[in-house]
Image (spheres, rainbow, N blue to C red):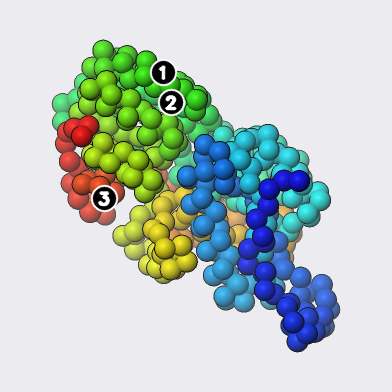
Amino acid sequence: MPSQRRPWGASSYCRGALAAFSCLIGLGGVAQAAKPIVIGTTVSETGPLATDGEYQLRGLQLGVAEINAHGGWLGRKVELKVYDDKSSPGAAVRLYQRLITLDKVNLLIGPYSSLVTVAVAPLINKYHMATLEPGASVPSIYVKGNTWNLMNTADSTTYLHQLLPLAKQHGAKTVALLGLESAYSLACYHARVAQAKELGFKIVYQTTYTLQTDFSSIALAIKNAKPAVVLECGYYPDSVNLVRSLHQQGYAPQFMGETVGPVEAAYVKALGPLANRVYGNSGWWFNFKTPGNAKFIADYKKMFHAEPDYHAAAAYTATQLLGAAVEGTHSLDQEKIRQWIVTHKVESIQGPIQDNQYGHTVGAVQDRVQIQSGVLKLVAPASLAQAKPEIPYTGN
């Protein structure tokens, strides 16, 4: 049997004689109306993507809790049915098949990571399930013929897009570029390679790697190449391992940038002072003056006794977008929900979300953050920046 968490959001619903009677008479006097609306999903609760996957799960849980606190959808409670896909694309495919055909969930939200979502996407489109994708940023998912996946985050080609222009302003001329061999990170990697060439950087080292890579030889090669900028498109575990390996080789570039890893509290905990002055990116931030953002932050801290990150914000936004579509169409019809989402702009804690006809979010970008004295701060755009960039990266 697959690993499953207890359903979230309706565990105490219809308990006791009075509640049971209420469920039977329900809205409109029929038992069917009292059944919860079930959202199915898988999350990387274990495996190499679990650090980031936990944030996505928490964002979904908070979203469902808030929905139920306000009466649910269509007069019904909402339940989140979650399976652990163990960071495995193959496991996720089997579990989404189960959610659709055996569990017969009403709605779907996609898994964490483009790596897993790319494998699941054909299944979503086969069954025509309008699926919000808070954890999948690779643009190749959202194309003609694959239109049931609905994006609500920034495109992975925008990850770290602001770092190379900053480095050029400060005289950097050489760069090392690394990309994890997964859909999202390769899209980021190829975009940064093209950007480096356009900006006139000399690429002195570039490589792709797997999550199981030992970075010792890569770090040595980078040290020998002496780039002013090291830029890595990957996930949390590989970002930590690369920084450690560079430190062991005694090399610190002028600019160090990594996707995903730096936004997690675990990153600073794992690296200590080595994390200082590393750049990252985020599609959401604490000081955004967006509708509901302050409440989201306060509620997240109250529920989980921790601070959210942009993965949690994107997941929370997915529940809000799905709810807006359900209420806007007054139905659970998949085609109506999909059509509503691609024809409406919704103000969210991340900012305005508008998908095109293929489910690709229009105009969203990842902003630049930097760890300064152990604290992650937004350093661009200037209109929202909490601090100025600290230069150079020192590696200690």
Tag 1 near tag 2, CB within 8 Å: yes
Check disc 2 and report the residue beneath it: 179
User: Circle 1: is it few (<14), some (14-19), or many (20+) Cα within 10 Å?
Assistant: few
Residue 375: numbered disc: 3
Residue 281: numbered disc: none
Can you name the residue that lies furthest to the bottom here?
18
Cα–Cα gap, marks 1 and 2: 7 Å
Check disc 1 and report the residue beneath it: 207
Q: Position of residue 385 (x, y in %)?
A: 24, 52
Q: Nearer the viewer, mark 3 or mark 2?
A: 3
Residue 175 can be seen, yes or no: no
Q: Residue at x 76, y 75 (%)?
A: 34
Cα–Cα gap, marks 3 and 2: 26 Å
User: Circle 3: is it few (<14), some (14-19), or many (20+) Cα within 10 Å?
Assistant: few
For residue 64, side relative to residue 262 (left or right) = right
Q: Residue at x 36, y 49 (%)?
A: 265
- Camera-side residue of 238 and 270: 270
